[in-house]
Amino acid sequence: MRKPASDFWLSCGHHLLDREESGGLVVTDEFIKAYLARPELSPPPEACVVERTIHAAFLMNPRRPFQPSEIAAIADPDARENWAFMVALRDLLMGHKTLEGAYLHLVRHGAGAMPSLILNQFVHVILRNVLDGCEDAFMLRAAEIFFRTQRLTTHEGSLIAADEETVAGAHAKSASPLVSMLGLPAGAAIDILGDDNTAEYWERSDRFDMAIDLTAGRRGLVALGHVLGRWIEHLLAIKVEIEPLTEAQNVDLTWYVGLDAQGTQIGNALWRGEDLDEATRSRIVGLYGLTFPDAAEVLDEAKNGPIYLLLAMEPDGLLRMKPQNLLTGLPIRRPEAVS
């Protein structure tokens, strides 16, 4: 039997961060310097002296102020762009008490030119903090949906979600700068998570090679609902109760949140009173009812029923969740809980 509190998702870099008393992640020099392992920032042999000097200075002191003129002096235009972005990212991280606060700032005020790759990395490591000590492999696998694109397919009447990069054979190009440093294997076979192999999840968690059954009424969607609740509670400091529902009929969408672009489109159609055709209905992956135990947390216009959460795949079977929608779309009175 697996030892309790085994580690998982080592590639997200959570071990490079500190944790404050209230549970948020405190950015360290080591965490910032981990980005220097990315090929975009590691000077190639032909790099100019300025680029090499900036890299060395950043490595020695990642909190060192950099003047725009220093970045502008880099000869290669792509390197200039990469270093300008890195300094802006560093300043964002340093400008907030916690990593959670930096992420909330991005999703509330607009991510601007921040690549989705970076947003997904933030979600990855924040969820690692949220789920620290979790003993449920189904919850951990369901949480991967928050930060990694899934490819859905029907198999023997079940709706199965597998990691898109792994399915496409691109696992070796993982977004995390720590994967190559950890020497994680690539190209492993994909297995569907079940009661007979849950103990394998922890040792395979950074390979993203276990699929999950998201068929309505089964354990996968229940586990995803638990993760949704913990995500909201951690980042907004608000208690919620989330119940998976089996179908999108006879629902009063007074307030709803699309958990991805497709879910938002379907929610908009239902709110307008439109009937969903069978093709659109078949793309709904998950439907949840969210309620607040403390009614004082909720805006008056949303107090008459549950908040519906909709998750849907694209026509090509891809599922790209946007967990930030939960942080900006709920009808709550105090959205500034984390800084």
Image (cartoon, grey):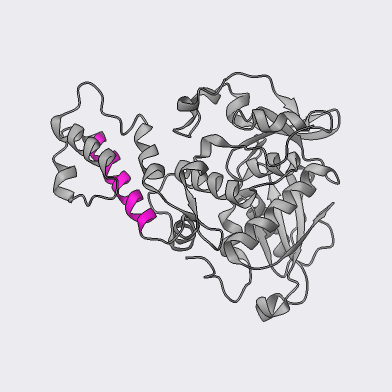
- Is 99 in front, or is 71? 99
Q: Residue at x 55, y 35 (%)?
A: 10
**Magenta span:** 79-94
Left or right, 13 with respect to 202, comes to: left
Left or right, 303 with respect to 299, comes to: right
For the N terminus, the quadrant is top right
The relative height of residue 179 versus residue 58 in the rendered view (above or below) is above
Query: Looking at the magenta stretch, what is its main secondary structure?
Result: helix
- Asked where in the image residue 115 lies, by quadrant, the reply is top left
The relative height of residue 118 versus residue 180 in the rendered view (above or below) is below
Q: x and y percent of residue 319 in the render? A: 64, 40
Q: Residue at x 47, y 44 (%)?
A: 116
Left or right, 9 with respect to 241, comes to: left
Q: Residue at x 17, y 37 (%)?
A: 74
The relative height of residue 177 versus residue 287 in the rendered view (above or below) is above
- Is 6 in front, or is 25? 6
